Amino acid sequence: AALVYESRQDEQPAIVMPSAEVRETMLALHRAWAKVTAVEAEHRIQASRPLDYSMVPSVHRWAAGQSLAQVLHGQTFSPGDFVRTVRQCVDLLRQMSTVTGLAPSARDSIRSAVTLLDRDLVSATITKDA
């Protein structure tokens, strides 16, 4: 979620990660992202936007099986923003699962994450009336 979501708010509220494991994973992601931005600066290319962790706890609750109403309770983002972000997470995870040389255990973890996220409104097909 930190890779795909971009809040519409200027100021980010304090974010409490749902577990020590998630917090450690986000710290590792932050360190990797710092390396990416350092390479961007070194090569004088436009910097990537900063990571936005504000949706991470909600996506985690969704993956844990909470309903959309439970996930959205007390949040400032819209249901549409949430569903769109989770769909983007699912898309990114599916792309990651196709990386050549990926360890089978990592591929299994990614597929499990897709299964946990791609449900209900997230997996609903959008159709337009003719």
Image: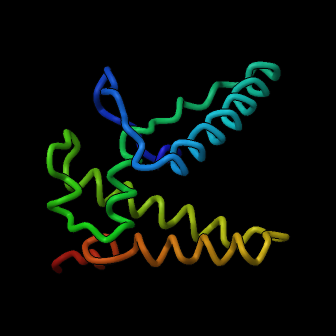
Q: Quadrant of the C terminus?
A: bottom left
Residue 51 point in image, percent of width and height: 52, 35
Q: Residue furthest right?
A: 101
Vertical placement of 45 versus 106: above or below? above
Vertical placement of 78 versus 101: above or below? above
Q: Is residue 15 left or right of residue 81?
A: right
Q: Residue furthest front?
A: 20
Residue 80 point in image, percent of width and height: 23, 55
Residue 124 placement: quadrant:
bottom left
The way the protein has been coloured in the rendering is rainbow
The residue shown at (36%, 34%) is: 15
The residue shown at (73%, 33%) is: 36
Residue 48 point in image, percent of width and height: 60, 31
The residue shown at (59%, 43%) is: 24
Residue 55 point in image, percent of width and height: 36, 45
Vertical placement of 64 versus 43: above or below? below
Residue 92 placement: quadrant:
bottom right
